[in-house]
Image (cartoon, helix red, strand yellow):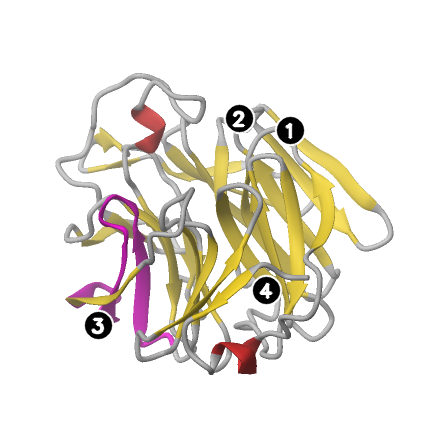
Amino acid sequence: MLKYEAVAEKFHDLIDVSQDMKLLGSVEGFFEGPIWSEKEQDLTFSSLTNEKTWRWKEGEGCTLLRENTNIGNGMAYDAAGRIIVCEQIGYRMARMNRDMSDYQVIASEYNGKPFNSPNDVVVHSNGMIYFTDPTFGRRPTRHGRFGRQQQPCQGVYMIHPDGFQVTLVTDEVDNPNGLCFSPDESQMYFAESGLSQITVMDVLDDGTLGNKRLFAKTLKRGHGFPDGIKVDSEGNVWCTAEGGVQVFSAEGETLGVIFTPEASGNLCFGGKEMKTLFMGSEFDFYSVETKVRGQSLRR
């Protein structure tokens, strides 16, 4: 039986709570950056502490794709099906093919200074690449190395796919972690880890962000903090946070919590109908079936 907390009745419209959470496999070092390929029907993800990239497919299990990733963290597909990855202790953004070939650094600095520690990434339908740049990778932990903050802010940046010009789109987010667009891409959500909250900003005509406001405070339900974040096709927001995965309506109402055995770092939708929710933790990764389609990227 699924361990959950329904805060609002709508939670039951999104997930059948009578199901069991499915254990898909184990990871050697904290599951992060999951991305689903609708074309290939597989899940690519990072394991942070041992610096590896893996791919999982139903019936086949996990295949090792890449090692020595500079603590590769968040990932996203671009319109051509290439993988964009945040290198947390490489302090840069890189791009490569699905088979890990043709590796290319696409951004490593802003205004002549290195990035702090790129963490998570999302790609707009127009090709623009957005990523968060907190300082997690410059701390003396398993997920970083000791070092000083390089940029004057912990910002969010946009990379132009033609020429890789970098633009600071906002410096208003505190410890920006996960990020995602609303279904119509008019808004962007952020997990602000240090404040235990989700904020939202408008995507302006020039691609920068404005009108920051609080979307929701996460519930204090145990291990973890706001980290990975995704939306479904109806605009509901799913965020790995305290206790597991916390779910919010498009209006910011807290709907419920899916509890996970350990702190959960990131998540994504996938499966044949894009209704399977994949989520991972320090040691294992899981799936549950939902009643709503995730945001489709058609990649």
Circle 4 — which element?
strand
**Residue 261 inside the magenta-drawn segment:** no
Badge 2 vs badge 1, beta-carbon distance below 8 Å:
yes
Give me the residue at 61% from left, 39% from top: 102
Q: Earlier in the sequence, mark 2 or mark 4?
A: 2
**Mark 1 sits on what residue?**
28
Give me the residue at 31% from left, 25% from top: 138
**Residue 186 inside the magenta-drawn segment:** yes
Give the label on residue 204, or none.
3
The Cα–Cα distance between marks 2 and 1, rounded to whole angstroms, is 8 Å
Residue type pointed to by label 3 = Leu
The Cα–Cα distance between marks 2 and 4, rounded to whole angstroms, is 24 Å
Task: Judge from the rendering whether residue 196 lies leftward or rightward of residue 118; answer left or right.
Answer: left
Estimate the x, y position of residue 79 in percent, counting from the top left. Answer: 54, 63
Q: Earlier in the sequence, mark 4 or mark 3?
A: 3
**Mark 4 sits on what residue?**
269
The Cα–Cα distance between marks 4 and 1, rounded to whole angstroms, is 22 Å
Which tag is nearer the camera, tag 4 or tag 3?
4
Q: Earlier in the sequence, mark 3 or mark 1?
A: 1
**Mark 2 sits on what residue?**
49
- Residue sitting nearer the eye, 53 or 293: 293
148 to 103, vertically: above or below: above
